[in-house]
Image (tube, grey):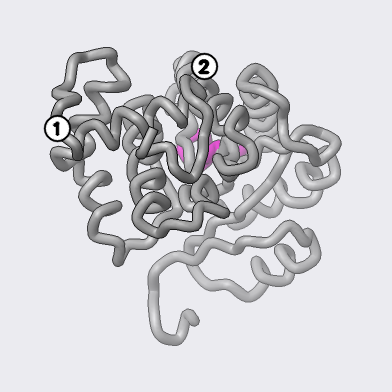
Amino acid sequence: MQEVTDIPLALDTMNVDAMKAGLEVVKGEVMINSISSQADRIAALMPLAVERNSWVVGLVLNDSGNIPRDANERVEVAYNIIMAAQENGIPMDKLLIDPIVLPISVTQDQVHALIDSMDMLQGVFAEFDPCPGTVVGLSNVSNGVPDESIASLINRTLLAVLMAKGLTSAIVDPNDEELMGIINKNNDYKIVEKIVNGEAVDESDPEILKFVKTVRILNEETLYAHSYLEL
């Protein structure tokens, strides 16, 4: 791949040996995706991250390798990863915390916990200068949603919600013009931002109402169903 592009690569694997092998051959700037709070992964990979001066994604799996139950646990695990990174000499501005996006169709409560954790993480980050960033695998939220247009709406709305709460980066399809519009803070983004901030929006407009209903399912104010826009 590096024969055809000089764009920095992100090495994405949970296999420590595979990650080590990749770091040995990759050229230039690189990102390790990811290091969780598990002691063996921290011990094996954080020194390599320092050696390569690489970016690090801190995935908030707990020390047993499990997904946190709620927002509080997400923030606790994130803090542990930040402390480990600091102890190992990883610059805070090269650390991205991934609070984990899960499918809303099967784990709606976890999507709500993700959103709540973003508010809490800003308080943690305020203790550091420079502070860590955040990253999410966005499309995970719509896995299992059968209608592509609704999946796209959920992806765009979650991205806007998280951006309004301080998200600094995301794994997205750069060829998706509607998603890139959100990233560029288009009118759809501004509508969602108002909803997040509790400002009034025109719910008589069918397009705006779609965003209102989608924010409600993301926040678990209404239960998710594939037909939620019709309810």
Question: Residue 3: image x %, image y %?
Answer: 45, 86
The three-letter code of the residue at mark 2 reads Met
**Residue annotated with mark 2:** 120
Question: Residue 69: image x %, image y %?
Answer: 72, 26
Who's the residue at 55% across and 40% down the image? Answer: 104
Residue 109 is left or right of residue 45, and the answer is left
Which of 151/91 is in front?
151
Secondary structure, mark 1, is loop
**Residue annotated with mark 1:** 205
Q: Assign the C terminus to one quadrant of the image.
A: top left
The three-letter code of the residue at mark 1 reads Asp
Who's the residue at 43% across and 37% down the image? Answer: 228
**Which is closer to the viewer, label 2 or label 1?**
1
Looking at this view, name the residue that lies furthest to the front. Answer: 231
Residue 96 in the magenta stretch? The answer is yes
Circles 2, 1 touching at the beta carbon (< 8 Å): no
Secondary structure, mark 2, is helix
Residue 147 image-quadrant placement: bottom left
Which of 154/9 is in front?
154
Which of 1/108 is in front?
108
Q: Is residue 148 above or below residue 85?
A: below
Residue 74 image-quadrant placement: top right
Residue 65 is left or right of residue 144, and the answer is right
Kindly report the distance in space between the C-alpha atoms of the residues bearing marks 2 and 1: 33 Å
In primary-sequence order, the first of circles 2 and 1 is: 2
Residue 90 in the magenta stretch? The answer is yes
Residue 66 is left or right of residue 117, and the answer is right
Who's the residue at 58% across and 47% down the image? Answer: 56
Who's the residue at 49% across and 49% down the image? Answer: 142
Question: Residue 5: image x %, image y %?
Answer: 39, 78
Q: Is residue 129 above or below residue 53?
A: above
Span of residues in magenta:
89-97
